[in-house]
Image: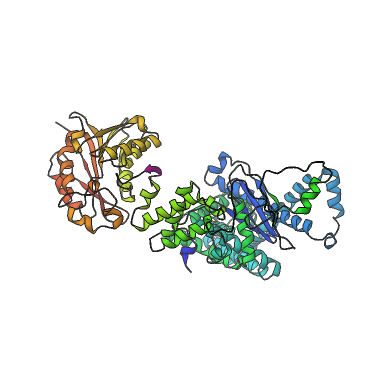
């Protein structure tokens, strides 16, 4: 099994979920749900509904799982019932029997809406009672007789839990043999494949979705397996009281177990490590029973449902027959019925294609021309196929050119681009092929959760430097300094200084650089991250920029540290595009560390810290430079996540 197609790596995690329904799929997005179904006449029916904003309780761990569990019961059952009603409405009337006497009586007395709510409540109640009876009460009663031979309560609880899991697996296996359920499981597989396709940044087409597994770590099947495994472990520590106490404890702890299982499921959907894979493995294996390989037609339905929840929050709801882009189709006879009896036909500002009478979204142009957004993106990905992560970079460049989101690229793939946009995209793809870093093409780079503008006057902020900032934040919080004074020397883009100012609102942060252009970039980044008023910017060569009497609680620096002769051996992206001034550390790469070791202590308060990023082979040399200065305590070398030397920290001794 290729876990790369199941667990998210470079793909973008999403909270979108779904459910298989009768002849279709339900997708649930951030602000709406969508039901897409294949009607008997092979048409695609779509119905969307807006969701109420999530309350504050849904942000509290464990509790949000309990709420989601209850909500999923009603939503899931309601969606299944709704899909049945939609099919009933679209089948010939003679194929369905008359409503029962009880149903007619409830409709006449309370109205159809009240009748629907009552039926939904009774259906959920029946399902919950039946599930508790089969999978909670029956196993504990069935294992009760083992107490005559086994006295260890942990063993008895484990036996009960294992029997419960076996019972559940057997139940799923038996129903999976039913023809109608197999179709339902095919739609379940189409839901998973489609979400995988979206999370991996591919165009939403059946062909692209087919390359993924039908298994997904955030599936409801995995949730149920988590529930059973967690209950097995939890109940093992509750002893083995009489059967009625056991039944009561199992039922009362269901919400707690559901909340814990929900948190594990969230972790599985956002992470890819050994622990998550081990926890997810049983649920993934179970999904081999609850999902089946879908047809392209079934994937088409799932894609329509997904596209329908990727729209803007203010987009109108849809209820009717749609095309594969989730756009409503207006039939000629329906339009004539609407205008019948009116002296003047109603006007419609939405442009309409005469050939198929489809209604299109205003502002989006469709054509068979080759210069569509989707075709251009495909071309860009092909051009960058030899570049590491080239497909994602081609997408980011197009997002930058058009000002679109990732979702826009999927929903508007048939839009014909303007000639100037197309040429600009081609130009920037050529820039990337020539070695220009992506960040200089798009002009931005994320660092510690903040966005920074970058250009060829500054180094591109890297993950290595986040290790330095993480350590600095940890030290300042541990020391609980009020109004700390922080210096970011050789600031470049301002990534270090701006992040520290953002993290510590009461701090005064000074940023220096020898390059006025770099300092101007740092000032701009301080403005866009709302910390400019608490920052001081000084231009000058190292400590020449600092007033003689100025002292700081912490001095941070990521100085140039590449040996002069080594620069030409670096990648094209670095040696030909990033500023040499920010790279060249002299013949041995230690020129600026000597300056820091000699002068930083003069500008550090007693007990203040000097923290520097270093090259992976410079730890011992920089540590010795600091220890030669008797004003520092013992220098410490720390490693990054790849276990390479990355930071040197020294504390300023107190002055006599």
**Percent x, y for residue 590?**
17, 49
Q: Which sits in the foreground, 424 or 487?
A: 424
Q: Residue at x 29, y 57 (%)?
A: 572
**Percent x, y for residue 548?**
17, 30
- Total label count? 0
Q: Which sits in the foreground, 408 or 452?
A: 408
Give the residue furthest to the bottom: 177
**Image quadrant where residue 183 sits:** bottom right
**Residue 481 appears in the picture as rendered:** yes
**Horizontal arrangement in the rendering, residue 172 relative to residue 120 (left or right):** left
Q: Residue at x 76, y 55 (%)?
A: 85
**Image quadrant where residue 656 sits:** top left
Check residue 135 for magenta coloring. no
Q: Which sits in the foreground, 110 or 466?
A: 466
Check residue 460 for magenta coloring. yes
**Percent x, y for residue 630?**
12, 40
**Residue 217 appears in the picture as rendered:** no
**Horizontal arrangement in the rendering, residue 575 relative to residue 130 (left or right):** left
Range of magenta residues: 444-461
Reply above or below: 14 against 487. below
Q: Residue at x 17, y 40 (%)?
A: 632
**Percent x, y for residue 447?**
37, 45
Q: Which sits in the foreground, 526 or 630?
A: 526
**Horizontal arrangement in the rendering, residue 392 relative to residue 542 (left or right):** right
Reply above or below: 39 against 312. below
């Amino acid at each position: 099994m290729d876990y790369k197609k199941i667990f998210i790596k470079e793909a973008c995690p999403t909270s979108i979920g779904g459910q298989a329904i009768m002849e279709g799929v339900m997708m649930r997005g951030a602000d709406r749900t969508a039901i897409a179904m294949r009607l008997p006449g092979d048409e695609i029916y779509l119905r969307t509904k807006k969701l109420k904003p999530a309350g504050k309780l849904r942000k509290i761990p464990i509790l949000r799982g309990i709420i989601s569990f209850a909500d999923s019961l009603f939503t899931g059952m309601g969606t299944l019932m709704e899909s049945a009603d939609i099919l009933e409405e679209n089948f010939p009337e003679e194929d369905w029997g008359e409503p029962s006497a009880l149903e007619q009586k409830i409709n006449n007395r309370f109205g159809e809406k009240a009748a629907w709510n009552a039926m939904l409540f009774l259906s959920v109640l029946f399902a919950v009672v039946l599930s508790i009876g089969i999978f909670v009460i029956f196993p504990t009663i069935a294992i009760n007789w083992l107490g005559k031979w086994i006295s260890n309560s942990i063993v008895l609880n484990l036996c009960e839990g294992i029997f419960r899991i076996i019972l559940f697996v057997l139940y799923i296996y038996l129903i999976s043999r039913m023809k109608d359920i197999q179709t339902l499981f095919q739609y379940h597989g189409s839901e998973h494949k489609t979400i995988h396709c979206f999370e991996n940044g591919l165009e939403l087409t059946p062909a692209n979705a087919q390359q993924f597994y039908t298994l997904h770590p955030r599936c409801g099947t995995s949730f149920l397996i988590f529930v059973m495994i967690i209950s097995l472990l939890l109940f093992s520590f509750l002893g083995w009281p009489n059967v009625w106490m056991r039944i009561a404890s199992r039922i009362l702890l269901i919400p707690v177990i559901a909340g814990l299982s929900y948190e594990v499921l969230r972790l599985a959907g956002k992470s890819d490590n050994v622990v998550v894979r081990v926890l997810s493995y049983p649920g993934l294996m179970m999904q081999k029973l609850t999902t089946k390989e879908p047809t392209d037609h079934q994937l088409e339905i799932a894609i329509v449902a997904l596209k329908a929840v990727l729209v803007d929050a203010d987009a109108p709801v849809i209820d009717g027959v749609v095309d594969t882009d989730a756009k409503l189709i207006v039939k000629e006879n329906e339009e004539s019925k609407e205008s019948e009896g009116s002296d003047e036909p109603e006007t419609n500002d939405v442009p309409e294609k005469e050939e198929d009478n489809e209604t299109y979204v205003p502002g989006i142009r469709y054509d068979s021309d080759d210069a569509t957004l989707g075709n251009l993106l495909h071309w860009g990905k092909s051009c960058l196929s030899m570049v590491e992560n080239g497909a994602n970079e081609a997408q980011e460049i197009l997002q930058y050119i058009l000002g679109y989101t990732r979702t826009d690229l999927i929903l508007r793939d048939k839009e014909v681009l303007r000639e100037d946009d197309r040429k600009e995209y081609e130009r920037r793809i050529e820039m990337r092929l020539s070695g220009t870093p992506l960040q200089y093409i798009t002009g931005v780079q994320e660092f510690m959760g903040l966005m920074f503008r970058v250009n060829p006057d500054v180094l591109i902020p890297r993950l290595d430097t986040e290790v330095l900032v993480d350590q600095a934040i940890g030290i300042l919080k541990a020391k609980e300094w009020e109004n700390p004074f922080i210096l970011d020397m050789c600031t470049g883009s301002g990534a270090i200084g701006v992040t520290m100012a953002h993290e510590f609102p009461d701090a005064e942060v000074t940023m220096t650089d020898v390059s006025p252009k770099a300092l101007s970039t740092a000032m701009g980044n301080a403005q866009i991250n709302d910390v400019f008023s608490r920052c001081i910017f000084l231009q000058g060569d190292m400590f020449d920029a600092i007033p003689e009497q100025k002292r700081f609680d912490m001095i941070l620096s990521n100085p140039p540290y590449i040996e002069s002769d080594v620069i030409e051996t670096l990648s094209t992206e670095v040696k030909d595009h990033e500023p040499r001034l920010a790279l060249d550390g002299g013949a041995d790469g230690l020129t600026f560390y000597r300056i820091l070791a000699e002068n930083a202590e003069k500008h550090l308060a007693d007990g203040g810290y000097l923290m520097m990023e270093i090259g992976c082979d410079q730890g011992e040399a920089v540590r010795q430079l600091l220890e030669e200065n008797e004003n520092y305590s013992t220098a410490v070398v720390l490693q990054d996540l790849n276990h390479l030397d990355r930071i040197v920290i020294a504390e300023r001794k107190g002055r006599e």
